[in-house]
Structures are given as structure tokens and as C-alpha cells.
Image: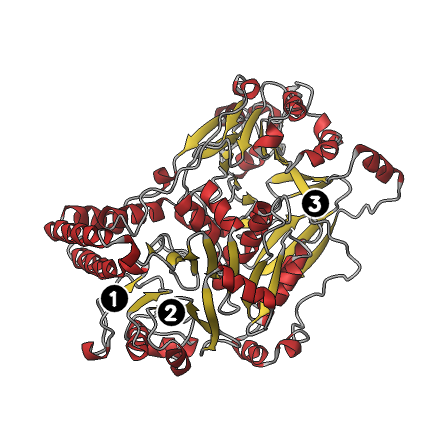
Amino acid sequence: MAKSYIDVSGDNEDVSPSVYAFFDKDRYFFECGEGSQRVYKERSSIKIGKIRTIFLTSLSWESLGGLMGVFYLLIAIEDVKEVDIYGPPGLYNIFYHSREFLNITLKVNVYEMNSNSVQTLNLEQLTVQTIPLSKRTLQQLQEQQKQQMDVTPFKMTTYHNYMEAEQWEKLMAATCAERKSMYVNVTQVDPSSVVDRDAVLCYIGITKDFPGRFYPERAIALGVPKGPMFHKLSNGQSVQTPKGDTVTPDQVMDKTQPGTRFAIIRCPTVEYFDSLFNSTAFTEYFVEQPATQLSSIVHLVPEEVLATEQYQQFMNKFGTATKHIIVNSTNCQDYKQLAAAEMEIKKLHSFLPSLFPGEAVPNQVAPLSNSLAALPNVIPCQKMTRAYLGPPASAGTVEFVAMDEEISEDKDDRVTSALMMHPKAEVIRQQIAKLTEELEQTPTEQRKAYPRVLFTGTSSAKPSKQRNVTGHLIETVKGEYMFMDCGEGTLGQVTRFFGREVTKDILTNLRLIWISHMHADHHLGVPLVLEKAAKARAQRPDIPRLVVIGPSELIDWLEGMKEVIHTDHIGFKFDDPSPLIDTCLEKLNVHSINNVFVDHCPDARGLVMEMKDGFKLSFSGDTRPSDNFIKEGKCSHIMIHEATFEDGLESDAIDKKHSTISEALQVGANMEAQWTMCTHFSQKTKCLNKILAPKSTLPANYSMAFDMLCVSPYQYPLLKQVLELIDLEEEIKQTVN
């Protein structure tokens, strides 16, 4: 009998929690927050091509911020043509407002479930009940029941915003105003619909009944020949033997076992208690009868809700056989899910500890309250927590799976091991230690610490195991922060670097988000930052609203997102003047910002930022080599430039309006930048030792960026050591099988 289970990931705030339901033929996701595609790519047990259905519990970016990244994984699989997404009303608005950048061949069937009553969905291997929750009080709920309600189970809208390259080019060449009427394939949002941004869906899943064991010897004894009749009997059908006797399934099989039931409950605050505790969907499971028990419940519930007496009483009503898996950022084991990225950072840290962190900053884990900790059936999520659904004898069994158990050793691992033991590596390590000591002994007043740049993502287009998509956190002066591009997972990277508590302080003191252009890998992380910043600043009315600067399409997109998610920001299109921007820059100790036109997509910009002390930082965004950018960034102290393609791929760079490594370096030389940093690498780029340009055309000082590189101006001399290390690693690769 095939096994089935749910895998539950914890909530460490670097990657959102999720539930992966595994069955023989199909797979299902519950929740799809930021970072999902990186985790799924890393886990060998997840067959992403078998995902056809995703369930979401809320409209928050924590629930759905990874959807678009997962779509890009799915469209790379030939036989995946469409996917079904279930969630609260208002879910389609997300896709509609994303139409200006979400151009995919995949058909996305969006099911907005009824927000007033329980609905049942009969899928191939799973029956799912959707249970709506709201902040309505008991009195409001009772009044609602008296009214005539919409009984439609769901509203389904298909999003299929795919255009061929020629159509897309015409679209991109149009003005922003013209574009809005050109999305002929995209269904309009119903203007009369009202979105409850606080709506929540809980789920109860019921597996198909488990057929009893089939006994071939019994069938043969009754005159049934081997072959198709065996198959019919095992599928519950009676057969007639060659002699004319009828054989029924109960003669050759054990009794059918009822399907296993599990639940996923999201209860964000105590305001949902009336709605949750009075839902009739759960009452039938309060009685301890094996046929109606829930084998496991995943509680996506914050610690302050879980600790209440009311919620614990609710949990206890399900009986002692039900396993309660707790998922929140306070009680879960602090377990990092991106194992390959952690290994890469540890390697770099062992050589350059002042530029790269060691292990991710651990988050404090609080024990469960005494009343819950004493119960054997209450389990805080650890590692990857697996709850079995079948076969029946295993249902309810819980075990913990380490992420590294699913990662097989590859060539990169062997190269890293060889690097650590190589004699040249020890020489490099000693050189770095000596230089670091010299830099740190520089008198404090001569050590320029700001602006300090944390590279949160250095990959182009999509993340790899080691690199996230584009993002930079800049501490412009002590305690004041801005983001310069913010791809999906950016906030998770910040949390991984600083830890949960410091990240809250950063969000409180975040002044500006600057986005270079309207491509998903540069801006999909913005909504989560805005959501989390709004929470962090909720009790601080003295703090000015967070400023977002970017293309007009970005500002429109974020305004559309306000219909669905809770944010509190003010958006400005490039070059819009405003006293609010002036105040923001004053706080950041910035003298001026220059949004420089570059050669990539409509309204793509680079950034030239000059601090009040004259320090100049330039960032190219995505672009071909740009004379305009060189002119405006002249004599920058640091220039960060995209280097998407390796040398030799100039035609690809021209076609896609990106730069090669040599082109990026030559921009730095022509700009006379003191330091040139290459970033935004393709999946294939591992080092900068294949530069084809003459050395005379290259800048004196250059290096390549890695995720989690955090560097202050006085530390720039160490950047050359990064290249020496990576060049040695490439040399070792040639000798390792």
C-alpha cells in the first residue's frame, strides 16, 4: 500500500512555512511564501512537476509571495500546462495587478472560495474542505446566518497572460497609459467585488479510503486466473471465473480502511476566535471516534494566540490521538532550510570572517507553555516535520527529516573539501588575516564604515542553490537603511544575516526602497518588506511613512496590492519631486540621488547616490554598457554593475540587453570608479578568471559579489582576496571528478 504524508516546514522568518502533501500520483502545496522555489529546488523528494494544486490560507505575502517564482519553475517542465490555486476572495486581484510583468505560458486557474460557508472540493486523491474565518464577532456571525448568503462554492478565473515575443515587444514599446488597454487576454477584476484583506481559510484534508490487502492465493483458490481479474478485484470490482462462479472483493481482500483526515488551521489573532470556535466544520472531530478523528493538525498560529486558555481548550477537544504540530516563529526549532547556501557562506566565512557571517544568526526559541509542553501529542515543528497519512497503520506517526538528508554529495562538495585542505588556500587565509588585522587597526576616525552594503542576492533572473535574486540592503549611516532592488527572498536573507530581532529594528528604521526596473527578479520582495515594516512600525506614529521610488508600473502595482495586503508606504515615480523624499534622504545622510536612464527595458534606471560627505555609490541595475551611466557615475568610490553573461556570450547579452563580465569591468574603468563590483550572474558563472578583454582596459580594483557579502568602504581592499580564493577553487575543479 503506497505511503502518503505531509511535510511541514517551520517558521524561522527567513523562509515562510509551508505544507507539502505527498501522494502516490499527485502532490499538493498548502502555502507558498517567499523562498519556496529555492527550497523546492533543493529538496530531492519534491517532484515539482507533479504539483497541480496549491492552497493558500490568506492574502498575505507570507502565504503567497512565492507563487510567481514557483510558476517559473513549472513553466520549465514540458508537460505542465496549468495549475489550480485556491484561496480567499481577492486572490485574483494579485494576478490582475501583476499583468505588466507576469507573462507566462502557464494557465493559472484561480479559485476564490466562498467566504461565508464551508465548501468541499473533490480532487483525484484528496477531498478538501475549505473553512472560512473572519474577524466577525459571534453576534455578527449570527446576524450573517439570518441573511440570504451567496451559496456559490467559488469563483474561478483563469489567468493566462501569455504573449509571443513580438507582441510583448510592442507592448513594452507602448506608453504606460497605452499598455493598460493592451492586455486583451487578462480578465478584468470585478469592480463591484469587495476584498476582505483579513480573510482566512482553514483546510481539512481527507484521503481516499485505503483498500484492504489483496491476497492472490485466495483468488487462485477460488478459480480466478492471474491477470486483469486480479486488478479488478483489487479495485473493488466483482469478477466471474471461467467456470462461471462470481468472486467478490471481500472474499480475497481485507476490509477497506477509511481515509485519513488532517487539518491546517491559521488563526492570526484572537480576533478570529469566534469564527474559529463556532465553525461546525470542526465539531464532528471533537468526539474520540477513530472514524472521524483528525490524525494531525498543523497550527499556523502565533505564540500569543497559542498561549491563550481559549485556544488550548479548543485543541484539547480533538482528543489525545490527534497530533498537534505547532508552526510559528517563536516555538519552532530554529532550523535553516537552504542547506547549500549555508554551506557556501560557511566556506567564505572560513577565509573572510569580517565580510561574511558564519552560520545564520540564531533566533531565540521559546518553550511551549507548561500546559502544552506536558501533552505528548503537541509537537513544535522541528527540521522538516513529517506526519504520515497512510498506510493506515502509519497514520498519525510523526518523524523529523533533516534537510541535508535530502541533499546528495555533488562535485561542489568535493571541491570545497579539497579547497579547505589545499596548501595555497592556507596561504590565502593567512594573507587575508594579516590584511584584516591591518585594516581593523586603522584609527576609528579614519575607518569609513558607511555606506555599508549587504548583498542579499547576486543571481540573475532566478535563484540558484547558492545565490538569491537581486537585492541590496544599504546602511547609509549608523542605524538608517534603504533597499536598492528587492527580489523575492530579500527580507529572508536579511533575517538570515542579522537575526529576527535586529531585522525588526532595520524595518523600523528603513527609509527608502529604490527599484531599478519592472522585472520580477528585482521587485517581488517588496510587498513582504512593506507588510513586515507596517507591523514593525505600527506603534511608532513618529516615524515617517516608508518611501518607494521606481518605475510608474511599480508604483501602480503596489497601489493595486494595497487592495489585498496591509501596507503603509508612499510611492513616487522616478524623478517625482517631493518634500517627503527630501526628508527621507536627509535621514539617510544622502546629498542627492540621480535616477539614470540605462539600456534595458522601458524606464529602466541606474542609481548614482552621493552622500553628504562626498562618497559616491553607483548601481547599474540591468543594462547594456551605458555612456549615460558612466558619465553620471564618474569617479564613484564604488560601482556595482550587472555581469549577467560570461565573456564570449556577447550576442546573448546584446539580445537580452545585459552586460558581459568584461563589459561591466570596462564600464568601471571608463567611469574611473575606485572599486568595481560585478553581480547579477547567470547560473553558469562561477568566477571572473575567463575575462577576454585586455588587462589595460580593466579597472585597477574589481571583484565579484556573493550572497551575504557585507562590506564597508574601509574593507574594500579585502575584495581582491575574494577573487584569489575563487580562482583557486576553479583551479581545483579541474582536478576533481
29 versus 594 height, above or below = above
Label 3 vs 1, first from the N-terminus:
3
Label 1 vs 2, first from the N-terminus:
2
Identify which residue is drawn at 35% across, 39% down.
404
Secondary structure of the residue carrying tag 3 is: loop
Numbered mark located on residue 688 in the image: 1
Q: Residues within 10 Å of mark 3 (few under 14, many from 20)?
A: many
- Give the labeled residue for mark 3: 199
**What amino acid is labelled 3 in the image?**
Ala
Residue 710 position in % (x across, y down): 34, 54
* Front: mark 1 or 2: 2
639 versus 19 height, above or below = below
Label 3 vs 2, first from the N-terminus:
3
Q: Residues within 10 Å of mark 2 (few under 14, many from 20)?
A: few
Secondary structure of the residue carrying tag 2 is: loop
Q: Residues within 10 Å of mark 1 (few under 14, many from 20)?
A: many
Residue 527 position in % (x across, y down): 57, 55
Q: Is residue 489 visible?
A: no
511 versus 47 height, above or below = below
Which color scheme is applied? secondary structure
**What amino acid is labelled 2 in the image?**
Gly
